[in-house]
Image (cartoon, rainbow, N blue to C red):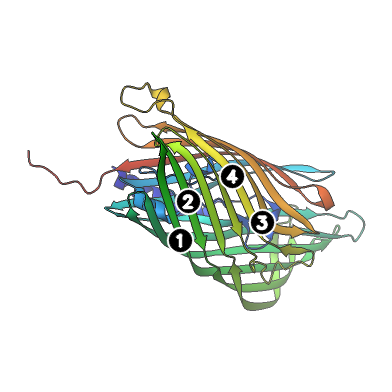
């Protein structure tokens, strides 16, 4: 049954990935877009924490974790986000629905392998700059697309409590943006369109260690390292004279010039370190830190004089709790409750003001009766940016859901 579900979900994911807009943030204009959370909902509900060697649930963030998987596992997740954007004088609302990830893990004795697909970054904005004075200059900026990541991971058990792993990633995608410039009450303007086709390989390495420190209490540690990677960008720029309707949708255009430029972007190296204490399938409390170096993310079409990129970092605190988890427990006692806090400095600096983000998270895992599978529901409330220096502050609320399905694929069949 799980095999049929995977096939259907892969088809669903491919349709959604092409149709969705994964961001509604004006900050997605910069670099290669708004960075998406690259883990699964179980981790996200704990503020991003991913330190436990889980035998049932896929941990996409650390490739070593695939060595701990004991059942074939499949997971798919998505979210709905509502965002309020505001400046010192104005406010607006935006909504989006997107698929977050699809992944499969297979246990192979001391080894475990996994593969999947997820958005890496997303671009999605529609900004109007209006000047109502006669012959005032007006602009409408739009952006869509983003970068996706396909990965293959392998984890290996060195000793029972020490596992290591690595993954190979192929990053690919397209970013489109346009800038329509026109004079007040004139239905003819100039439009600049930019299309960036992105692709490149990257790698990620990880290790996880567990040690019993008191009766049933364990110490958990997790480490990952991602070397710097090159992202090739082929940029096509087209400048046209256009006519448009009342919604600023271009009706007719006459291309004046087109040029193509190839540039190499640099995704910076990244390192994470996490630690915590807990009891297997009972409770966990931990913290995690992620540090990322300075990269070269500004492309030919979005290099802005007052924008720079610095080192980024994030800090998470989170955990989970299960009231009781045995065959005699009532259903509500088997529900896994997760929670967390996170704070991140994004590394994007506008007019000397660094854009940061903070959020509180909560989630529940609802077990599917008669199996090891579960349905995860997560909530996140956060804030990104500031209204200082004429910038935009985003207050967002996210409702996320995922399915984590487990089965045994390689069982020796008996004869009746």
Residue 176 image offset from top left, x and y in percent: 63, 63
Q: Residue at x 55, y 68 (%)?
A: 228
CB contact under 8 Å: marks 4 and 1: no
Q: Earlier in the sequence, mark 1 or mark 3?
A: 3
The image shows residue 285 at horizontal and vertical percentages of 51, 37
Furthest-front residue in this view: 214
Q: Marks 3 and 2: in contact by CB < 8 Å?
A: no
Is tag 2's residue or tag 3's residue first in the polypeptide sequence? 3
Identify the residue at image location x=65%, y=65%: 294
Give the spatial CA distance, label 4 vs label 1: 20 Å
Residue at 85% over, 57% down: 185
| Gap in angstroms between the C-alphas marked 3 and 4 | 23 Å
Q: Tell which of 141 and 415 is nearer to you.
A: 415
Residue matched to label 2? 222
For label 1, the crowd category at 10 Å Cα-Cα, with few meaning under 14, some 14 to 19 and many 20 or more, is many
Q: Quadrant of residue 173?
A: bottom right
Q: List the residue tagged with mark 4.
A: 316
Q: Position of residue 138 (x, y in %)?
A: 83, 59
Image marks 2 and 1: residues in contact by CB distance under 8 Å: no
| Marks 2 and 3, how far apart at CA | 30 Å
Q: Earlier in the sequence, mark 4 or mark 1?
A: 1
Q: Of callouts 2 and 1, which one flags the residue occurring earlier in the amino acid sequence?
A: 1
What mark, if any, has residue 303 been given in the picture?
Answer: none
Q: Give the residue pinned by disc 1.
A: 205
In the rendered structure, find residue 28 and report the number of the disc placed on it: 3
Q: In this picture, is 319 found above or below 230? A: above
If the image is split into quadrants, where does the C terminus sit?
Answer: top left
């Amino acid at each position: 049954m799980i095999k049929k579900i995977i096939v259907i979900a892969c088809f669903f994911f491919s349709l959604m990935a092409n149709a969705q807009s994964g961001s509604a943030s004006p900050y997605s204009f910069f670099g290669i877009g708004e960075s998406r959370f690259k883990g699964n909902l179980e981790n996200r509900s704990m503020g991003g924490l991913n330190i436990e060697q889980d035998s049932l649930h896929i941990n996409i963030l650390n490739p070593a974790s695939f060595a701990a998987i004991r059942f074939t596992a499949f997971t798919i997740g998505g979210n709905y986000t509502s965002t309020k954007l505001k400046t010192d004088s104005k406010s607006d609302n935006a909504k989006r629905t997107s698929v977050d990830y699809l992944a499969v893990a297979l246990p192979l004795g001391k080894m475990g392998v996994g593969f999947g697909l997820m958005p890496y970054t997303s671009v999605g904005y529609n900004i109007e700059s209006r000047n109502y004075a006669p012959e005032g200059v007006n602009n409408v900026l739009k952006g869509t697309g983003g970068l996706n990541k396909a990965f293959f991971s392998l984890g290996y058990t060195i000793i029972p409590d020490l596992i290591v792993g690595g993954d190979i990633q192929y990053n690919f995608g397209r970013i489109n943006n346009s800038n329509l410039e026109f004079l007040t009450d004139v239905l003819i303007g100039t439009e600049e369109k930019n299309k960036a086709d992105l692709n490149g390989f990257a790698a990620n390495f990880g290790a996880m260690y567990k040690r019993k420190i008191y009766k049933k209490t364990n110490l958990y540690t997790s480490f990952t390292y991602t070397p710097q990677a090159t992202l090739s960008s082929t940029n096509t720029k087209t400048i046209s004279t256009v006519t448009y309707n009342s919604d600023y949708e271009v009706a007719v255009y006459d291309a004046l010039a087109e040029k193509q430029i190839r540039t190499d972007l640099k995704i910076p190296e990244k390192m994470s370190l996490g630690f915590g204490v807990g009891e297997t399938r009972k409770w966990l409390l931990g913290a995690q830190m992620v540090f990322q170096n300075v990269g070269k993310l500004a492309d030919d079409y979005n290099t802005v004089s007052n924008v720079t990129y610095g080192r980024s970092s994030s800090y998470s605190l989170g955990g989970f709790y299960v009231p009781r988890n045995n065959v005699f427990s009532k259903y509500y006692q088997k529900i896994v409750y997760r929670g967390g806090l996170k704070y991140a400095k994004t590394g994007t600096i506008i007019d000397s003001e660094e854009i940061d983000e903070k959020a509180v998270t909560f989630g529940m895992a609802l077990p599917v009766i008669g199996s090891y599978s579960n349905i995860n529901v997560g909530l996140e409330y956060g804030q990104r940016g500031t209204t200082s220096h004429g910038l935009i502050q985003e207050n967002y609320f996210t409702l996320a859901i995922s399915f984590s399905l487990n089965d045994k694929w390689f069982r020796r069949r008996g004869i009746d």
